[in-house]
Image (cartoon, rainbow, N blue to C red):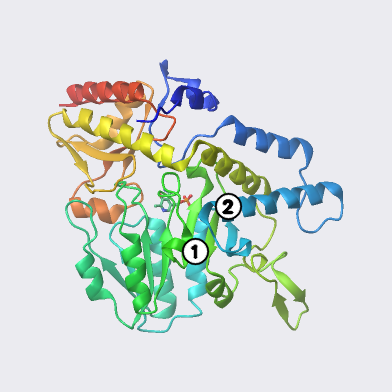
Amino acid sequence: KAHFDVETIRKDFPILSRKVNGYPLVYFDNAATSQTPQQVIDTIVDYYSRYNANIHRGVHTLSQEATDAYEQARINIQKHFNAAKAHEIIYTAGTTNAINLVASGFSALLNEGDEIIVSALEHHSNIVPWQMLCERTGAVLKVIPMDENGTLKMEEYDKLLSEKTKLVFVNHVSNALGTVNPVKEIIEKAHAVDAAVLLDGAQAAPHIKADVQDLDVDFYVVSAHKMCGPTGVGVLYGKEEWLNKLPPYQGGGEMIATVTFEKTTYADLPHKFEAGTPNICGGIAFGTALDYMNAIGFEKIAAYEQELLEYATEKLQEIEGLRIYGVSEEKTAVISFNIGEIHPYDIGTIIDKLGIAVRTGHHCAQPIMDFYKIPGTVRASFAFYNTKEEIDAFVEAVKRAKNMLS
Ligand code: PMP
């Protein structure tokens, strides 16, 4: 097995050396947001120290430098996801914003009785915008059900698909369970009935390098803050033909070709969808974050995280009464669990006192919790900068919490 030099990597993350409640921080809430390496922090400091300026408008040097850096980052992002064209990458404020952009655009393309399919495993951000879209258009929302393992029932998906289906929305990886969905099959089958597919890549992107051309996906959305970048920025990848079909999301500066009070014409891609002053520094820093992760290598990251996942799963399963939700052949480094009837919030609170950060609750995926008839889970999610020693400390803390609470 190739050696993964986690100790050297950890030195890039200043936050990992801090203490919480007198204990070394163990950060296992990476599925909510990842930590930031010094390289990305340096990009942010450099931007505000040397070339903070508005883009695309100015003839002056600072504005040109900012524009060049922002557009170079777009090209880095394009290459990372293997999009065919840079203008198929639209900067957004994040995954939620990107989904709303697409949902808003489809308002103009859907008719009453058209059908939209989502999965039972979705994050609220991939449910609510489609419900709002259905209210506006009279389209109907259908749901691919899941089984006890947290796997989608693909035979039910087959039954839902018809010539009425216009759109299919599924997350690539479930944020609540970490399970990887069979996205290639979902896309192929949707295309067979001429439906478009949007993949929510928010949880997949930190672990799996998606190739949007190989997937042949129509839309792919991610947030920078889950992949070592800053909050408030993300991207929508869209196939050029789809982005040309969708009307603009927001009106304003930057997104126009000409404006008169009688008629406005819109700018070409990508600017048509980028109204107003964007998160310039965030976009540039997202580019740095991708460079940083690619320099380590996604295959190495994935292999190491699988080691952490297996190690933690084995150790946790030694705890009596502990149930892990989401069992699948392919899973990212997320463990969602409960112990007997103990409330997940109580476990989270006690282990925080020992410096350990996990997420508790419904993880913005209430339908999954309803399916299991539970209020929520404790979710530990690992990143490539975590260690087996941290997992040991975490398992010990969970055992202590269990003893205190039962
Ligand atoms: N989808 C999934 C699967 C997620 O995990 C998240 C973040 N928890 C989102 C969408 C929303 O991302 P953001 O809050 O960055 O817009």
Question: Percent from the top left, x then y, of residue 326?
Answer: 23, 47
Amino acid found under the numbered disc labelled 2:
Ile
State the separation of the CA atoms marked 2 and 1: 21 Å
Which quarter of the figure has residue 14?
Answer: top right
Quarter holding the N terminus is top left
Residue 151 location in percent, x, y? 23, 55
Q: Respond yes or no on whether mark 1 lies under 8 Å from ligand 1.
A: no
Looking at the image, which residue is at 59% across and 45% down? 286
For this view, does 91 lie left or right of residue 344?
Answer: right
Q: Is residue 321 visible?
A: yes
Q: Amino acid at mark 1?
A: Asn
The furthest residue to the left: 320
- 397 or 13, nearer to the observer: 13
Are the residues flagged by discs 2 and 1 in contact, CB closer than 8 Å?
A: no
Mark 2 neighbour density, 10 Å: few (under 14) some (14–19) many (20 or more): many
The residue at the far top in this view is 22
At 21% from the left and 69% from the top, the residue drawn is 156
For the C terminus, the image quarter is top left
Q: Looking at the image, is 13 positioned above or below residue 360?
A: above
In percent of width and height, residue 214 lies at 44, 62
Left or right of 208, for residue 67: right
Kindly identify which residue carries mark 1.
100
Question: Looking at the image, is mark 2 or mark 1 earlier in the sequence?
Answer: 2
| Residue sitting at x 15%, y 37% | 341
In the visual, does 347 lie left or right of 214? left
Residue 281, image x, y percentages: 67, 45
Q: Going by the image, does 250 lie left or right of 362?
A: right
Q: Which residue is mark 2?
A: 77
